[in-house]
Image (cartoon, rainbow, N blue to C red):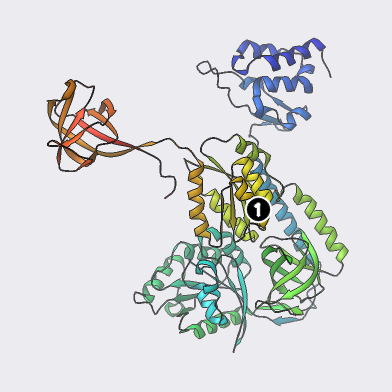
Amino acid sequence: TTGPPSHMALAVLLALFLPVAEVSGSASRFLTRFPKRVQASNGCARGKAALFGGFEALSVNSLRSPRWKVHSSDTSVSDNKPDVVKRRIIKKKTATGESEEPELPLKERLALKAEKLKMAQRAEDEKIAAQQDTSKLKMQNRPPVVTIMGHVDHGKTTLIDYLRKTKIASGEAGGITQAVGAYQVETDMGKITFMDTPGHEAFSNMRARGARATDIVVLVVAADDGPKEQTIESIKQAQAANVPIVVAISKIDKPDANVESVKQQLMNYDIMPEEWGGDNLISEISSKSGHGVDGLLENILLQAEILDVKSPIDGQVRGVVVESTMDKYRGPITTLLVQSGTLKKGSVILAGAEYGKVRNLLNDKGKQIKQAGPGTPVEVLGLSGCTRSGDLVLGFKNEKEAKQISSKRQKANMEVNLNENEIDPKALFAALNKQSHDVSYILRADTHGSLEALELLIEQMNNKWIAVKILSSSVGPISASEVERAAITNAIVVGFNVEPVSAAEKAIRDKDVAVVHGPVIYDVLDRLKTETVKKVSLPDIEEFRGRAAVKAVFSGTKRNLVAGSEVIEGKIQAEGVLRVVRDGEVIFESEMTSLRVVKDEVEEVEEGNECGILVEGFKNLKVGDEIHCIAMVQPKVYD
């Protein structure tokens, strides 16, 4: 320590015993007159931070590094409100000056670091792939990769169902797609690989990844509904990825189908039918009867022929992760699309930060296969963990090299990943000291893509009444440890397409924890909103019900006045707040105590009818005044 001991002792005494609300400008000036060498010391910095900055100013950096300090120029206390201390700004010195940007919340900092890491990893993957000399590799025609996109419930999965002759749509929860499914269809004209993306608004990122990993987009638009929000979003994503769009106008057998109207509406989004001089091939189909489906397949293969889709079947394996999930019996399962080379059982691959030797290969029908060539979707068992959708997959001859890269990436990811055993400490602190309108969540899902969609939906639940906080999120079933955390922090446990393990079910009963889980995204969201509202205590708000014009004034009981009135807007109710308004200003307010029509007490009087309103405690009521009826109600948090 530097500086005289007396100065240090004084700083500590001030920090410990002087209440923050009583700090005056003279005390601030006194501390700023300390010798500079004392101010630079950790002890004094700590005392000064505790004195002026409160909890927020005591950052790790301010205690460890002399480059950080809390500036006393912003530490004045409000004269009018001595109990309110202004927010401290922690400044970091730079070569060009000082930055006054407040430190980002942990979650945002982690997200920023994660994105930088992701970009660095992708650049490294591209560099590794570029080392291979592809000029001598044999190129071969492969199945075109086709992503089916469009609005929810427009018939995307029913189309795949017809093509595969299986019951995908009826087997999916709620009859809607909630994960990216990759399937290969054999036709008389050749194989086509289809990717079915979710249509629900929550799965926007999944659709974007699908558009980037594909050769052709098939845009499904219902003939009885036309382009909707996710239709338009899908068009923009395909256009941004510079992927050709083939349109399938579905449900043409519906009574209110209007194919021509749909074509005209699509022109507003730069989709021009070939028959009208444009570039987009359009098919009119009924997925239930199969009408027009053969024509759609011909259009897809015609577009693929124009694109001349080819890939090398030898050389380094390269692909992209479609989805990844954790199976409690088989471990991490990764669905990937092979883009070049041939993936075989026993191959060593790297996907994002995970690596492994392929133990098992399964095709889209769940059957074991020995190898998969370009354009083929497969399920892979053998990776060290779950990887994220959109990660590149690279093959390695040397397992040691793949392991080294994986270890390096996992180490880097440890700084930004809040895994299943970690919780954001600030979010936890906020949950333990939460305000009445704060609600915390612990999330679990079956895949990373689903988890991403769930996080997005919960972030969108923020409004002026509710402040949401996600304490942790991870892939896998709901465990007992999640339930214990929820009990401590009064959080809601949310599971999408996952169930609680047996130990968690017991903890849920014992701890009486709110748990919402299910296989259908919009059902989970509806029940989650209900549970969220139960967690908060909100003040009643005013709701205008109606107003009445005073036509006559009479004397009532106990010298109170009765307003003979006509309801001119809405309705007047017997319960609520009564306000007397004159010349646009409220001059009196009280509880509504009596509402009569002739001599009968009534609950309410509708617009256009006359009534008598008892006004207690106001002697200055005049003809021409207005009486407003206000109800005090709980706010409607969600529609």
The residue sitting at 64% across, 31% down in the picture is: 100
The answer to whether one can see residue 9 in this image is yes
Residue 589's place in the image compared with 536, above or below, is above
Outermost bottom residue? 188
Q: Give the mark count.
A: 1
Q: Nearer the viewer, residue 157 or 596?
A: 596
Q: Residues within 10 Å of mark 1 (few under 14, many from 20)?
A: some
Residue 522's place in the image compared with 181, above or below, is above
Question: In the image, 398: left or right of 58?
Answer: right
Position of residue 225 measured from the top left corner of the image (x, y, whole percent): 39, 69
Q: Nearer the viewer, residue 216 or 634?
A: 634
Q: Nearer the viewer, residue 313 or 229?
A: 229
| Quadrant (top left, top right, bottom left, bottom right) of the N terminus | top right
Q: Quadrant of residue 363?
A: bottom right
The residue sitting at 51% across, 38% down in the picture is: 437
Question: In the image, 283: left or right of 186?
Answer: left
Position of residue 65 measured from the top left corner of the image (x, y, whole percent): 78, 29
Q: Nearer the viewer, residue 28 or 305?
A: 28
Q: Quadrant of residue 143?
A: bottom right
Residue 64's place in the image compared with 47, above or below, is below
Disc 1 residue type (three-letter): Ala
Position of residue 202 measured from the top left corner of the image (x, y, whole percent): 53, 58
Mark 1: secondary structure: helix
The answer to whether one can see residue 97 in this image is no
Q: Quadrant of residue 23?
A: top right
Q: Which residue is mark 1?
A: 504
Question: In the image, 368: left or right of 543?
Answer: right
The residue sitting at 51% across, 18% down in the picture is: 81
Position of residue 618 measured from the top left corner of the image (x, y, whole percent): 22, 22
Question: In the image, 337: left or right of 84?
Answer: right
